[in-house]
Amino acid sequence: MRVDRFLSNLPRFNRQQVRLLLVEKRVRIDGKIVSDPHAEVLEFSRVEVDEEVLQAGKPARYFMLHKPPGCVSATRDPQHPTVLDLIDEPDKHDLHIAGRLDFNTTGLMLITNDGTWSRRLTQPQTKLPKVYYVETEREIGPEYALKFTEGLYFAFEDLTTQPAELLLLGPTSARLSIVEGRYHQVKRMFGHFDNKVLRLHRESMGPLVLDSALKPGEYRALRTEEIQLI
Ligand code: URA
C-alpha cells in the first residue's frame, strides 16, 4: 500500500497532516526517510514517524525445499506428513507454499510468508515456466508436443491450457514446461492420451532451480539475489 494511504488510514492523521509529515521528512520506512507519497509499505516494512514505531514489520522469509514423495503440500494434514513438518523454523505456521505438488510428486517447492512474492510466482499471467521431468507408463507419441503447444481443453475449469513445451528425453520420459499450475495439470495433460504419469519431478520455477545439493526432504533459505529474481 502507498505510504500516504497507510498513514491516512490511521485515525490520528488526516490527509493534510500526512502531506506535511512527508514534506517535513519525518517518515521512515525500514530506516530510510521517505517523502514520496507513492513509496510502498509492505506488511514486512518497519514504519516510523519521528521516533515512534507505527508498524514494527517482520522479516520476510523464503525457502527452497526438495519435496520428497509421500508428503502432502499443505501446512496441516490429519493423516499424512506435510511439507511443513520438514521445516524447522520459528513461527512456521506463518509460512505458505508457492505452488503445490501432488503427494508423490518430488522436487522444487518454494515456501514463504510473502504473499505478494508467491502470487507473482504462481499466477498464470506472469507466465513463469515451471519445468517438470516426467516418466510415463506408455510411449510418448509424436502427437503430444503439438497438442500441448495448442493447449488442452479442461472442461472442469472451462479453459484451454496455455501453450506448453515438451522435450522428449526417451520413449517414456520427457521434460515439460508449463506456465500455469492447474490442479493435477501434468497428469491430466498426459491423461488426455491415456498415458499414466509414473514419476513427476519439478526441476525449476522460472529462474529458480532446485539446488542439487539438497537431498529429498532438505531445504535451505533462498539467497537475496534469488528472491529478487521473482
Ligand atoms: N502437475 C501434476 O499433475 N501434479 C503435480 O504435482 C504438479 C503438476
Image (tube, rainbow, N blue to C red):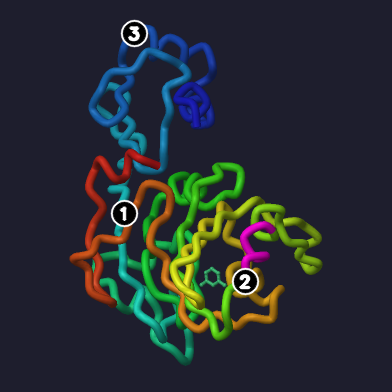
Q: Does residue 140 appear anywhere in the picture?
A: yes
Name the spot of residue 144 as percent of width and height, x first: 64, 65
Magenta segment, principal secondary structure? helix
Residue occupying the far left of the picture: 213
Residue type at the position of mark 3:
Glu
| First to last magenta residue range | 141-146
Q: In the rendered view, does 172 fall on the left or right side of 56?
A: right
Q: Is residue 177 magenta?
A: no
Q: Which mark is residue 202?
A: none
The relative height of residue 141 versus residue 130 in the rendered view (above or below) is below
Secondary structure type for disc 2:
loop
Q: Quadrant of the C terminus?
A: top left
Res. 24 mark: 3
> Which label's residue is closer to the chain start, 2 or 1?
1
Residue at horizontal 30 percent and vertical 41 percent from the top: 56
Q: Where residue 42 appears, x then y in whole percent?
A: 41, 37
Mark pair 3, 2: CA separation: 68 Å
Q: What amino acid type is highlighted by mark number 1?
A: Tyr
> Residue 156 at what x, y percent from top left?
78, 68
Indicate left or right for 111 with 129 as reference. Answer: left
Q: Nearest the camera: 148 or 181?
A: 148
Crowd tier of the residue under label 3, counting other residues whose Cα lies within 10 Å: few below 14, some 14–19, many 20 or above: few
Whole-percent x and y of residue 23? 38, 7
Question: Which disc number belongs to residue 141?
Answer: 2
On residue 62, the disc is 1
Q: Earlier in the sequence, mark 3 or mark 2?
A: 3
